């Protein structure tokens, strides 16, 4: 969340940055959504956890083709996060940070970086073109989540528990051309296979 201790000038600048990001993405055709502030919930043992940012509008699916001028109006003082809908212009594959780092290294090695978003909860989002499915290796993995049709993800600079969402690799690096989903999926499968191989080696070393 926006820190209650922030000076009003900082809070105002943060909102201006978020509004500018939203308008810029909307002009590029990304289906931007205004998000509500993440809410605290009580978990087992009265520990506080956090829901992810959710759309501020119940009818968000009906607004996906809104004009950037509408987006500019949405992002006023009461807007606390920036979301983008998935399944129409882009998809996202969500992974933990270890797999994310391994996949990012492989993408750099190929010379074809992909837009990557990092969340303060240690999760990474790899943005791709829209896909109809993902490889079974990814679908069957408990820590991997595909954000496709009827989904949405937070984008920078949305506030989150313990920080803000930020870019690991900005879309400008890719020239605003989203990488083909199949190419990113293949890299993630390779990175996942490498993680499994490393885990097996570590297990054998421990046993020895």
Image: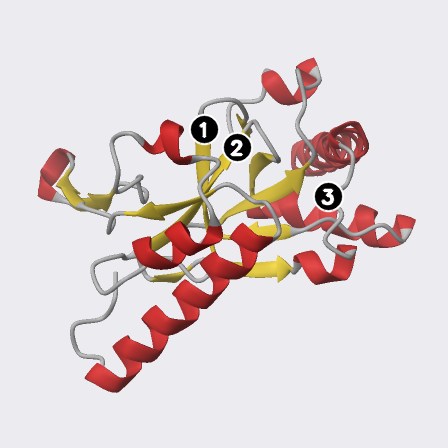
Residue shown at the point (90%, 48%) measured from the top left: 110
Residue underneath mark 1: 151
Mark found first going from the N terminus, 2 or 1: 2
Name the outermost residue toward the left. 46
Residue at x-position 11% and y-position 38%? 45
For the N terminus, the quadrant is bottom left
In percent of width and height, residue 116 lies at 63, 51
Residue 161: where, in percent of width, then height? 30, 56
- Residue at mark 2: 86
**10 Å crowding of disc 1: few (<14), some (14-19), many (20+):** some
Q: Find out whether the residues at labels 2 and 1 contact each other: C-beta distance under 8 Å.
A: yes
Q: Is label 2 in a helix, a strand or a loop?
A: strand
- Residue 134's tag is none
Closer to the chain start, of discs 1 and 3, is 1
- Indicate the secondary structure of the residue bearing disc 3: loop
Q: Which residue is under mark 3?
A: 178
Classify the position of the C terminus by image quarter: top right
| Residue at 15% over, 45% down | 47
Q: Of 177 and 137, which appears nearest the observer? A: 177
Q: Nearer the viewer, residue 94 or 59?
A: 59
Q: Quadrant of residue 144?
A: top right
- Horizontal relation, residue 16 to residue 113: left or right: left
Residue 136: image quadrant is top right
């Amino acid at each position: 969340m926006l820190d209650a201790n922030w000076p009003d000038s900082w809070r105002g600048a943060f909102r201006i940055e978020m509004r500018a990001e939203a308008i810029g993405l909307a002009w590029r055709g990304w289906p931007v959504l205004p998000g509500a502030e993440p809410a605290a919930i009580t978990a087992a043992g009265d520990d506080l956890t956090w829901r992810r940012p959710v759309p501020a509008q119940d009818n968000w699916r009906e607004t996906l083709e809104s004009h950037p001028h509408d987006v500019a109006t949405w992002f006023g003082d009461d807007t606390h996060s920036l979301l983008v809908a998935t399944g129409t212009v882009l998809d996202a594959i969500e992974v933990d940070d270890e797999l994310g780092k391994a996949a990012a290294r492989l993408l750099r090695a190929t010379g074809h970086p992909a837009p990557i978003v990092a969340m303060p909860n240690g999760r990474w989002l790899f943005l791709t073109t829209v896909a109809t499915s993902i490889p079974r290796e990814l679908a069957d993995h408990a820590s991997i989540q595909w954000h496709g049709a009827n989904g949405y993800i937070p984008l920078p600079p949305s506030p989150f528990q313990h920080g803000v969402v930020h870019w690991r690799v900005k879309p400008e690096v890719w020239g605003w051309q989203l990488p083909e989903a199949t190419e990113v999926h293949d890299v993630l499968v390779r990175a996942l296979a490498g993680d499994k191989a490393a885990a097996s080696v570590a297990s054998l070393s421990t046993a020895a």
